[in-house]
Image (spheres, grey):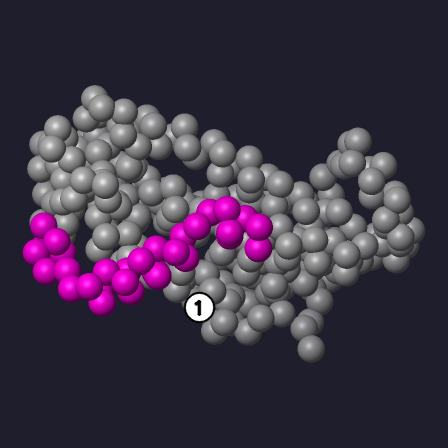
């Protein structure tokens, strides 16, 4: 996955065949855009609202924290908030133009969006690559799947994959992003999501947050400790079942000296 992201990034530094493909897709889509298709694409793009996704995941983490009597389910969500803030700076480094702005369709008159102008370093301060909405969608929905470990495998795959696919179709059709912007954003989002899920949140020192943990009913006692261990084991078990169904390695690091918990 890292290799794929690096390969796409490298091919966008110059007017490569991949950049030409982006332009061809954009021109083909804009050649025929009936009103009903634009409305559907706008609905698909709505799935990529980062703030809404972050709020939903934060709510899920709060529910987990209340159920398990521990603040530890909130830690990966807080880390994801910080990672999302950092990706905005990464986008500015590419300085890639957008296919067109909605306020000046089909193209901004002073911006070259042909193969030469659609590569990196356009010199106009754009930040099209990678798509921030695609990064957020892949990251937040991946985290939501992890916070809902009792979902069936089919539902977990649907929740992890479908929003990113629909968002890619929507924002490519509307001209908000090149197709490779979305693909690069999805790859980076999946990498961020896997990084967050693999971190040992159940054992990381809480530091000053330990005071808050101690004020949660059941938190410092045996019940609270077993609760957050149960949260970690349940999430690990569900992630392993999801990976096994696709014949892929587990996306969550194993927890040492703890027996696997079988799900009912």
Residue depicted at 89% across the width and 52% down the height: 217
Residue 23 located within the stretch drawn in magenta:
no
Residue lying at the far bottom of the rendered structure = 264
Residue marked by disc 1: 158
- The magenta stretch spans which residues? 27-56
Is 132 situated above or below 167? above
Q: Is residue 245 left or right of residue 9?
A: right
Residue lying at the far top of the rendered structure = 123
Residue depicted at 24% across the width and 32% down the height: 96
Q: Position of residue 137 (x, y in %)?
A: 43, 52
Between 170 and 213, which is closer to the camera in this rendering? 170
Q: Position of residue 78 (x, y in %)?
A: 62, 41
Main secondary-structure element of the magenta-colored stretch:
helix
Between 192 and 259, which is closer to the camera in this rendering? 192
Is 54 situated above or below 88? below
Secondary structure found at label 1: helix
Determine the image quadrant of residue 206: top right
Residue 28 located within the stretch drawn in magenta:
yes
Residue depicted at 67% across the width and 73% down the height: 263
Q: Position of residue 212 (x, y in %)?
A: 82, 40
**Residue 95 appears in the figure:** yes
Between 261 and 264, which is closer to the camera in this rendering? 264
Q: Quadrant of the C terminus?
A: bottom right
Between 77 and 227, which is closer to the camera in this rendering? 77
**Residue 194 appears in the figure:** no
Residue depicted at 88% across the width and 44% down the height: 215
Other residues around mark 1 within 10 Å, as few (<14) / some (14–19) / many (≥20):
few
């Amino acid at each position: 996955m890292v290799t794929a992201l690096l390969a796409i990034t490298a091919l966008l530094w110059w007017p490569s065949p991949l950049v030409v493909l982006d332009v061809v897709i954009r021109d083909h889509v804009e050649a025929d855009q009936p009103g009903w298709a634009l409305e559907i694409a706008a609905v698909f793009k709505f799935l990529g609202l980062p703030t809404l996704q972050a709020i939903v995941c934060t709510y899920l983490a709060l529910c987990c924290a209340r159920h398990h009597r521990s603040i530890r389910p909130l830690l990966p969500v807080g880390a994801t908030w910080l990672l999302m803030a950092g990706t905005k700076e990464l986008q500015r480094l590419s300085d890639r133009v957008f296919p067109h702005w909605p306020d000046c369709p089909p193209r901004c008159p002073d911006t070259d969006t042909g193969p030469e102008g659609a590569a990196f370093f356009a010199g106009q301060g754009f930040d099209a690559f990678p798509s921030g909405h695609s990064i957020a969608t892949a990251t937040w929905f991946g985290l939501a799947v992890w916070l809902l470990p009792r979902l069936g495998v089919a539902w977990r795959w649907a929740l992890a994959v479908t929003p990113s696919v629909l968002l890619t179709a929507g924002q490519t059709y509307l001209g908000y992003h090149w197709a490779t912007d979305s693909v690069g954003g999805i790859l980076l989002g999946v990498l961020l999501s896997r990084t967050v899920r693999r971190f040992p949140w159940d054992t990381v020192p809480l530091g000053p947050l330990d005071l808050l943990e101690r004020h949660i009913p059941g938190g410092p006692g045996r019940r609270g400790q077993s609760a957050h261990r149960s949260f970690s084991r349940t999430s690990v078990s569900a992630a392993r079942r999801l990976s096994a169904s696709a014949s892929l390695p587990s996306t969550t690091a194993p927890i040492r000296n703890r027996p696997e918990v079988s799900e009912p």
